[in-house]
Amino acid sequence: MTAPAELIVLGPVATLAGGAGPGWAEALAVRGGRVVAAGSRPQVEALAGPGTRRLELAPDEAAIPGLTDAHLHLAAAAMARRAVDLAGVVTIDELIRRVRAFAAAYPDPEPWIEGGGWDADALGRWPTADDLERAAPDRRVAVWAHDHHALLASARALAEAGIDDARSDPGGGVIRRDASGHATGVLHETAAGLVGSLIPPAAETAIGDAIEALTLELVGLGVVAAHDPGGLSPTPGLGGPMGAYRLLAARGRLRVRVHACLRPEQMEAAIARGLRSGSPLGPDPLDRLRLGWLKTFADGSLGSRTAALLEPLDPFPGEPDPPNGGYGVWLTPPAELRAQAARAAAAGIATQVHGIGDAAVRAALDALAPTVGATPLMPRVEHAQLVSFADMPRFAALGVAASVQPVHVRSDAVQARRLWGARAEARGYALAAIAGTGAVVAAGTDAPVEPVDPWPGVACAITRSAPDWAPGTPPFGPQNALDLWASLRAWCVAPAVTAGERDRGRLVPGQRADIVVLPAAALADPVEVGGALWFARPRLVLMDGEVVAGG
Ligand SMILES: [Zn+2]
């Protein structure tokens, strides 16, 4: 006679069993933090004993598995909450006002004013060091563009970095200059490192506190796990965010499951310690922290005109000459990508490659192909925003996962249509086309580039349009829409598959009981633009069968 269930959940549960659709069950039984039965009420009730807790859903509620954000710069997003926020700013005056207010709130000796979120397209021009001088005279200021591919630095920061008229561009980077050759303050790609390397890293305890605060919010949104591709002041060695995660895990304060990624400059330190993808990073009583992937970059971004393309950008009136004749920029040349991925795989570390443009995605697939099967984690292409038709079937054929951010359709549609022309809608953000070949397609937000709330992305994968678009704007490449359940599988099942986790993602026997209770209206099909799914808020979230939010 087996022990009775510790918890039974009564109400419609989309278990996501099988390969498609919701996999509805009437009820679930949980023991030892795991699902032990999913089926009819009588089947589940039969497992109840005198001490069994009962969670009865309201008539207008339904449950799904917890979400995993497959691409969330968690530590960076957490620290971004403690920096000047320039997202959504559409005038230079507003940018100046926000930096001025932040500078007043954090007067010297706070050494650096950091932040980001500005968008040159929204501002109508590139912001400058002169603008910052009006906001925060003689302060060290470094604020990122929304896509993190350009950094705006103040005059004092430029001077301390030795950036003057005579300084030449570093490899893989551009110091933006005016007509007379003066550095304007904007530093593209690797040039940002000239200033970025001067900023002292935040203490691990401060990063840890920020991470904990943000993960409490994530759990409330139904996100129980995150894959952090890194990106907060990566340093050689394993301090900074990696140290902060280890500290939190050791203290039992990591509120979500985390796969933390390495950047190339950290790889040798990780190999020297014998770390492998999927392995713990240290003492971790809640068993939540794992080493993720080596994260490396093939190309830049759409908005910075630095995505590596097979054919150049579409020219349009008023657009200044883009870098490299419109073919984009290699942040890591293809031969070096191959070498990095091979080096990592030989040490048991999986690789994920940032690839936005179709040339970058092709190079990423080429580099990752020889590493398939080398670790329990799947090699991944991050973003895969523009993929040539010839490369689409290669994800499934090779066993490389696509890690996509559906909410970028909302933010990028105008820009993608403009810069990529007809190819944008034909094969951009091609979620259904890639998934249709049998590939593993995992979804994420890319926060802090986008908000941490996953629900607009869950919805946007389906609607391919957004409630904040101008009325009458057609959906973007509607042939690439996922259905409701395929979208939820991309958020709940696929990320765990890419991480080699066989015990998470579905609510079927043997899996961890990570359960999100939602208003049933959020799961109504068809999904409407700006409907309940877009703004879904869980009433209750459980991890390992224990309530962690709501209730
Ligand atoms: Zn990212």
Image (cartoon, rainbow, N blue to C red):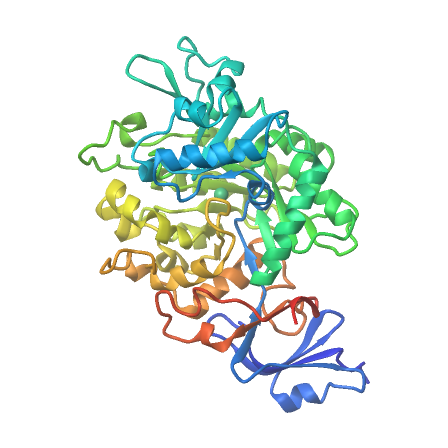
User: Can you say whether 7 is above or below 369 in the image?
Assistant: below
Residue that appears at 38% across and 53% down = 393
Q: Where is residue 243 in the image (x, y as percent from the top left)?
A: 71, 38
In the displayed structure image, the side of residue 338 where residue 208 appears, left or right? right
Q: Quadrant of the N terminus?
A: bottom right
Q: Quadrant of the C terminus?
A: bottom right
Q: Where is residue 306 in the image (x, y as percent from the top left)?
A: 36, 33
Count of numbered tags? 0
Picture quadrant of residue 298:
top left
Q: Where is residue 116 in the image (x, y as percent from the top left)?
A: 48, 37
Residue that appears at 35% across and 69% down = 528
For the residue pair 116 and 398, the one nearer the viewer reads as: 116
Q: Can residue 423 be seen in this view?
A: yes
Residue that appears at 22% across and 60% down = 472
User: Can you say whether 308 is above or below 250 in the image?
Assistant: above
Q: Where is residue 190 in the image (x, y as percent from the top left)?
A: 47, 25
In the displayed structure image, the side of residue 67 where residue 531 appears, left or right? left
User: Can you say whether 530 is above or below 280 in the image?
Assistant: below
User: Can you say whether 453 is above or below 187 in the image?
Assistant: below
Picture quadrant of residue 487:
bottom left
In the displayed structure image, the side of residue 305 where residue 514 appears, left or right? right
Q: Can residue 189 be seen in this view?
A: no
For the residue pair 449 and 260, the one nearer the viewer reads as: 449
